[in-house]
């Protein structure tokens, strides 16, 4: 099912959250030898709406009236809102051993021992924030 949010997107204030620059990413990775990529399951579908916003995503089918409880595909600010959340969750570790790109997390380290500690921190933060990874797509 595809819902056309064109009219809603016209009145939403656009979030101009910046994506990371590739040059900055290369600079951060200098000296790193060990890498892991963590893919978050369902990306921004993990973001819950405020109860007052559910009505804005309402749609009707022949089976009834429905409202999204989580961020829906097609909303203009969905990717940037999720990126902002991820950067907030991992703020203390950005530019140190984590790069976040929307729903992917790159963990980088100089050694296996350091990498084990970094992964432990990342997985703990995901657990604390109730964010779920799709480990079948992780590398």
Image (cartoon, rainbow, N blue to C red):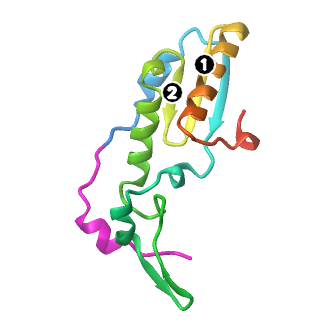
Magenta-drawn stretch contains 13: yes
The answer to whether marks 2 and 1 mark residues whose Cβ atoms lie closer than 8 Å is yes
Taking 70 as reference, is 135 above or below it?
above
Tell me the distance, in whole angstroms, between the alpha carbons under discs 2 and 1: 8 Å
Residue extending farthest to the right is 136
The foreground one among 34 and 75 is 75
Q: Is residue 14 left or right of residue 73?
A: left
Q: Which mark is residue 97?
A: none
Res 108 label = 1
Identify the element where label 1 is drawn: strand
In the foreground, 116 or 19: 116
> Nearer the N terminus, badge 2 or badge 1?
2
| Mark 2 secondary-structure assignment | strand
Residue drawn 31% across the image and 66% down it: 9
Q: Point out the image quarter for the N terminus.
A: bottom right
| 29 and 130: which is toward the camera | 130
């Amino acid at each position: 099912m595809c819902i056309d949010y064109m009219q809603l997107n016209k009145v939403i204030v656009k979030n101009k959250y910046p994506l990371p620059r590739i040059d900055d990413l290369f600079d951060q990775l200098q000296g790193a030898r060990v890498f892991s990529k963590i893919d978050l399951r369902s990306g921004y579908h993990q973001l819950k709406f405020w109860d007052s916003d559910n009505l804005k995503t309402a749609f009707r089918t022949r089976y009834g009236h429905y409202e999204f409880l989580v961020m829906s595909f097609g909303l203009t600010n969905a990717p940037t809102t999720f990126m902002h959340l991820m950067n907030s969750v991992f703020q203390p570790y950005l530019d140190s051993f984590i790069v976040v790109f929307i729903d992917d997390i790159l963990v980088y380290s100089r050694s296996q021992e350091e990498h084990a500690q970094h992964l432990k921190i990342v997985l703990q933060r995901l657990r604390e924030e109730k964010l779920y990874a799709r480990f079948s797509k992780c590398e």
